[in-house]
Image (cartoon, grey):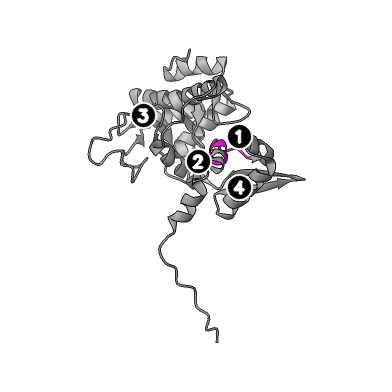
Amino acid sequence: MDTRTEPVLGDVEIAEIGALLSDRARCRVLMALDDGRALPASVLADEAGVSRSTASGHLGKLTDAGLLWVEIHGRHRYYRLAGPQVGELLEKLTALAPTRPVRSLREGTRAAQLRAARTCYDHLAGRLGVAVMAQLLAKGYLAGGDGLFHPDLAGTDRISAPGGDVDYALTPAGQEFLVELGVRVPASGRRLVRYCVDWSEQRHHLGGRLGRAVLDHFLAESWIIRRDVGRAVRVTPAGRTALADLFGVSWG
């Protein structure tokens, strides 16, 4: 008879994750991957500002902890965030973390690009993401909130439950708009309509399955283009036209 028993597990040990995130280089690696793409170790070393050997050690620790997945293509190893739950963790941390001072023209340019238009793991963020969600609300395609961050109102935008306090819903008019636009929303998976409090705009931007579908459509139509590295995206001339005609968003 098998007398083996499963080990008794105690409380979660969040200090283990805290120790990993206490290193600035590892945090830079995670943020570099917060656009949902897989990147090689060499690029991540440059993003973190460390040597290749040092980056290898950091990547090993993040992978062993389950924060990263590694994909092997021939002799090359590519890393990506280990699922949307890690992206959601980073979103929550960015809402709490202070911003870094800008010390160079290059840093200033990148900061401006991030604030203008970026991806937040698998959905649009920055001024672009906030503007798109605001127009979906204004046109009656989304309902349930006003798109504003209300930390002073009881029961809304609590740090303990970001993205779930305001119960946004897609309206019938919104469903019709998406069908006409050709946006394909997955039938199952995570919550359909979720939101994040945008750290740079302090307003809501669209997440969930709908947020991902909107981002995928913008990329497929070449309305936005990813930059070579990082989360910032660039709005194309076709994207400016589509934003104005379809969403009522003026993008100069």
* Three-letter amino acid code of the residue under disc 3: Gln
**Which region is colored magenta?**
29-38
- Residue 245 to residue 92: above or below: above
On the image, numbered disc 3 is attached to which residue? Answer: 202
> Closer to the observer: label 3 or label 2?
3
Q: CA distance from mark 3 to mark 1?
A: 26 Å
> Closer to the observer: label 3 or label 4?
4
Q: CA distance from mark 4 to mark 1?
A: 13 Å
**Quadrant housing the N terminus:** bottom right
Give the overall secondary structure of the magenta segment.
loop
Q: CA distance from mark 1 to mark 2?
A: 33 Å
* Three-letter amino acid code of the residue under disc 1: Glu
Residue 73 seen in the current view = yes
On the image, numbered disc 2 is attached to which residue? Answer: 186
Return the mark for residue 58: 4
User: What count of labels does the image hold?
Assistant: 4
Nearer the observer, 49 or 238: 49
Q: Regarding mark 3 in the picture, which secondary structure is present there?
A: loop
Along the polypeptide, which appears first: circle 1 or circle 2? Answer: 1
| Contact, mark 4 vs mark 2 (Cβ under 8 Å) | no
Return the mark for residue 4: none
* Image location (x, y in percent) of residue 204: 37, 31
Q: Regarding mark 4 in the picture, which secondary structure is present there?
A: helix
Does 248 appear in magenta? no
| Contact, mark 3 vs mark 1 (Cβ under 8 Å) | no
* Image location (x, y in percent) of residue 145: 30, 32
Along the polypeptide, which appears first: circle 4 or circle 2? Answer: 4
Residue at 58% in and 48% down: 68
Q: Regarding mark 1 in the picture, which secondary structure is present there?
A: helix
* Three-letter amino acid code of the residue under disc 4: His
Return the mark for residue 47: 1
